[in-house]
Structures are given as structure tokens and as C-alpha cells.
């Protein structure tokens, strides 16, 4: 859920989900819904296709493989569109961009808040100290948005955001337990 003029914090997303009788998905739930039982780089498979997700490459109609290329695209896009966000209605890339479970927009359009506080995957590994500042203070955001390029839209990509953070490329989806859905 996201509107181009609506900016959603984590608190906003949680409040809406509770109002709707749902919740935000945990990070593992989100990732499993995105790539299914067989890990996939993107929800539809392991080959990037700019026509399957609302991304910087979709709008550029050319590959964007590094930050320099992204910066050039962003400057063009921002000048041409005067900073107006490029979110699209849900379902624009269905079914070709859907996950194995038929879940739409798990990559692109808007990055999505999860219910999971940021943590290190393997506490036994050595990480850059900057990551330690986010542990349990930030929330995991997944999926990448319309202004991200292919590598930021992978099913394994994770971002840590402060709970009060909001922008025009971050939204959320609601989840419910299977037992709540019924037969």
C-alpha cells in the first residue's frame, strides 16, 4: 500500500495493519513470500527483467548496473518529472513479476516495512561497526522501490530504517496468519 503523496512511517504501517485486523509480516515471512521454497534472486526467477518490476531500470528503459549509472538516471528522472514519485497501481506487473505464491510487487514499486527489528544474521561474523548502531533500533525494510535498480530489488536485499523514517518510496503490506483465513 502506498500513495505517491503519502509517506508512511513504521508506526503508521503498524497502526493501519492493526486497524485492518492484520499485522506486518516478519522479515522471514516477507522473504519466503518473495522467493518461495526454492530461493530466487527476484520473485520471478534468477534473471533480471526490467519489465517485471517498477524500478529505476523500468523507467530508464536501459540497464543500470552501478551507482554512477543510477545517479545519472536519477538526475534525468528528477529533472523531467520535477521530483514527482513514480509509484504505480498495485498489480501493474502481475502475473509476470509475481512470486511463486502469486504475491505481486515483492520487488519494486515501494520498499516495505516488516515487523522485524534489524539484527545481524550471524553474530559470530565480523561486521563494519556502523551496522551495530542499527541493531534493535532500526526496522528491516525489504523489496526496494520504484527508484531502486536491480540489485536493490533482490529477494535477499535488506535495508535498516529508523522507525520514524518515511519517504515516497516506502510502504507496507499486511499479513495474517493462515489460521485466521480459514478454509
Image: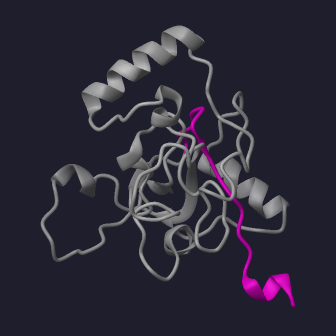
Where residue 55 appears, as percent x and y from the top left, is 51, 39
Where residue 29 appears, as percent x and y from the top left, is 56, 74
**Image quarter of residue 5:** top right
- Residue that appears at 73% across and 47% down: 90
Where residue 62 appears, as percent x and y from the top left, is 41, 31
Residue 78 placement, left or right of 120: right
Q: Is residue 177 magenta?
A: yes
- Residue that appears at 17% across and 53% down: 129
Residue 63 placement, left or right of 170: left
Q: Give the overall secondary structure of the magenta segment.
A: loop
**Image quarter of residue 164:** top right
Instruction: Work out whether 82 lies above or below 167.
Output: above
- Residue that appears at 15% across and 72% down: 125
Where residue 35 appears, as percent x and y from the top left, is 50, 71
Q: Which sits in the foreground, 156 or 18? A: 156
In magenta, the rendered stretch is: 164-183
Residue 112 placement, left or right of 21: left
Q: Residue furthest left?
A: 126
Instruction: Work out whether 168 lies above or below 45.
Output: above
- Residue that appears at 68% across and 52% down: 13
Residue 157 placement, left or right of 90: left
Amino acid at each position: 500500500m502506498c500513495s505517491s503523496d503519502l509517506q508512511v512511517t513504521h508506526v503508521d504501517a503498524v497502526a493501519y495493519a492493526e486497524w485492518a485486523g492484520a499485522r506486518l509480516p516478519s522479515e522471514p515471512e516477507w522473504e519466503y513470500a518473495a522467493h518461495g521454497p526454492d530461493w530466487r534472486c527476484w520473485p520471478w526467477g534468477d534473471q533480471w527483467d526490467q519489465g517485471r518490476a517498477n524500478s529505476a531500470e523500468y523507467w530508464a528503459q536501459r540497464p543500470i548496473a552501478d551507482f554512477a549509472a543510477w545517479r545519472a538516471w536519477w538526475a534525468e528522472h528528477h529533472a523531467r518529472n520535477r521530483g514527482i514519485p513514480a509509484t504505480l497501481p498495485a498489480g501493474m506487473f502481475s502475473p509476470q513479476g509475481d512470486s511463486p505464491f502469486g504475491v505481486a510487487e515483492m520487488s519494486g514499486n515501494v520498499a516495505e516495512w516488516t515487523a522485524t527489528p534489524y539484527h545481524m544474521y550471524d553474530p559470530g561474523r565480523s561486521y563494519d561497526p556502523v551496522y551495530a548502531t542499527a541493531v534493535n533500533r532500526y526496522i528491516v525494510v525489504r523489496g526496494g522501490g520504484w527508484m531502486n535498480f536491480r540489485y536493490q530489488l533482490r529477494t535477499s536485499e535488506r535495508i535498516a530504517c529508523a522507525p520514524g523514517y518515511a519517504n515516497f518510496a516506502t510502504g507496507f503490506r499486511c499479513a495474517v496468519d493462515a489460521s485466521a483465513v480459514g478454509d
